Image (cartoon, grey):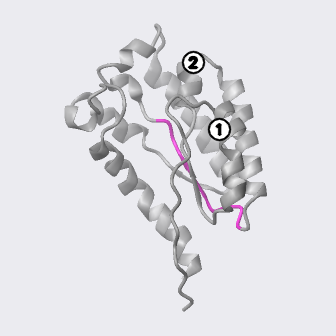
């Protein structure tokens, strides 16, 4: 069995980034490091900032086309659904009269369909993110973002898919 060292790179993302920000500011980092495995969790800020599903889908498609185009193994991408920020104490401040959970389910269906079409793993963190409503320890002190405890729950869901992809290098 071939053993390979695994280098983990930091996440270049920024709070508030949209899909367009990822395209403009993060894809260069991707091309520079040439990763073997990529995780993508994007879209909540497109929704918060009022973009529609068509805009999101177009940009997500562009992102996936570019990322897959730069990878040796085109299916070494894990897509992660958008969490339900509306259940956090500050989340209601960003709802603007919209039905956030139902809307995000539609947005997440776009992610799932793109993943299925491209034979990519999709990890659905939406249901577990809704537990932030009843457990304050899952929310950061800013009352909006997930705490480290919540992110660990997400990581626990992502880990099996990541392990499947890593095994091809061992």
Residue 51 sits in quarter: top right
167 in the magenta segment? no
**Residue closer to the observer: 117 or 145:** 145
Residue at coordinates 45% horizontally, 14% vertically from top-left? 95
Which secondary structure dominates the residues rendered in magenta?
loop
Give the left or right position of residue 117, taking residue 4 as reference: right
- Residue drawn where x is 71% and y is 43% of the image: 63
Q: CA distance from mark 2 to mark 1?
A: 15 Å
92 lies above or below 163: above
Res. 150 image quadrant: top left
* Residue 79 is a magenta residue: yes
Assign a secondary structure to mark 2. Answer: loop
Q: Is residue 135 visible?
A: no
Q: Which residue is mark 1?
A: 22
Residue nearer the viewer, 106 or 69 = 69
Magenta segment boundaries in residue numbering? 73-82
Could you tell me which secondary element the residue under label 1 belongs to?
helix
Circles 2 and 1: CB distance less than 8 Å? no
Left or right placement of residue 74 versus residue 147 in this view: right
Q: Position of residue 50 (x, y in %)?
A: 59, 16
Pointer 2 residue = 49
């Amino acid at each position: 069995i071939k053993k390979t060292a695994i280098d983990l790179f930091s996440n270049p993302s920024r709070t508030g980034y949209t899909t367009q920000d990822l395209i403009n500011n993060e894809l260069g980092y991707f091309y520079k490091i040439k990763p073997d495995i990529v995780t993508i969790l994007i879209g909540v800020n497109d929704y918060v900032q009022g973009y529609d599903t068509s805009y999101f889908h177009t940009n997500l498609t562009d992102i996936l086309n570019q990322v897959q185009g730069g990878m040796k193994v085109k299916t070494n991408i894990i897509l992660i659904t958008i969490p339900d920020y509306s259940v956090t104490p500050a989340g209601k401040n960003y709802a603007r009269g919209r039905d956030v959970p139902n809307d995000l389910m539609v947005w997440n269906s776009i992610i799932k369909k793109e993943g299925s079409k491209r034979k990519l793993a999709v990890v659905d963190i939406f249901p577990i993110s809704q537990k932030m409503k009843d457990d304050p320890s899952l929310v950061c002190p800013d009352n909006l973002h997930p705490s480290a405890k919540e992110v660990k729950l997400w990581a626990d869901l992502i880990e099996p898919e990541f392990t499947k992809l890593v095994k091809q290098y061992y």
